[in-house]
């Protein structure tokens, strides 16, 4: 499974914010730190704010910050929120019953769907065991806080 760029950027933004808790940050800072398009980062920050992972403060002295401690932000929850569709195959998606392209000729006898479902469950189980605090290393703290 490959995560979307939006999920990748969301995790990077959260790591950035978790490494710089002493002050508010800007979208521009985060985009520049990772070499990401500012336009993409605006969309990601908007979604993270809607989900309650970050706080956005408007105004002249505004900015963004984590909405809660990094230890309280679950990586699995972030990934599930940012990914529109976690299905590994079309037949595993939410529209498998109505979309002719997602219907499988092997359906009654297919075992692949079960195997891939088990693999996806294993991945989400691992992600659910980790928080943002677990993935912020001293390297990020030092690199992202350097003048």
Image (spheres, helix red, strand yellow):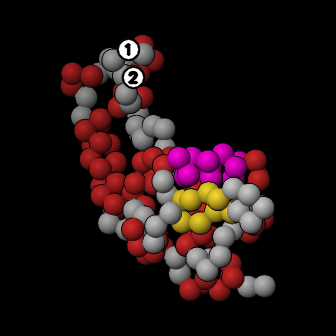
State whether residue 1 appears in this view: no
**Residue occupied by mark 2:** 95
- Main SS, magenta residues: helix
**44 inside magenta stretch:** yes
Task: Name the secondary structure under disc 2.
Answer: loop
At label 2, counting other C-alpha atoms closer than 10 Å, the crowd grade (few under 14, some 14-19, many 20 or more) is few
Task: Name the secondary structure under disc 1.
Answer: loop
User: Viewer-proximal residue, 130 or 51?
Assistant: 51
User: Viewer-proximal residue, 119 or 74?
Assistant: 74
* Residue drawn 56% across the image and 59% down it: 55
**Residue occupied by mark 1:** 98
Position of residue 141 measured from the top left corner of the image (x, y, whole percent): 61, 82
User: Viewer-proximal residue, 86 or 143?
Assistant: 143
- Contact check, label 2 and label 1, Cβ < 8 Å: yes
In which quarter of the view is residue 57 placed? bottom right
Q: Quadrant of the C terminus?
A: bottom right
């Amino acid at each position: 499974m490959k995560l979307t760029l939006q999920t990748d950027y969301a995790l990077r933004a959260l790591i950035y914010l978790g490494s710089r808790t002493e002050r508010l940050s800007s979208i521009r800072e985060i985009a520049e730190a990772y070499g990401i398009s500012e336009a993409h980062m605006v969309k990601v920050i908007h979604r993270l704010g809607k989900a309650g992972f970050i706080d956005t403060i408007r105004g002249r002295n505004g900015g963004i910050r984590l909405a809660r401690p990094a230890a309280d932000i679950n990586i699995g929850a972030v990934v599930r929120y940012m990914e529109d569709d976690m299905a590994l195959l079309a037949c595993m998606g939410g529209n498998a019953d109505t979309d002719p392209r997602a219907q499988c000729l092997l359906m009654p006898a297919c075992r692949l769907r079960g195997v891939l479902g088990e693999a996806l469950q294993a991945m989400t189980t691992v992600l659910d065991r980790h928080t943002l605090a677990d993935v912020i290393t001293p390297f990020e703290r030092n690199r992202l806080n350097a003048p």
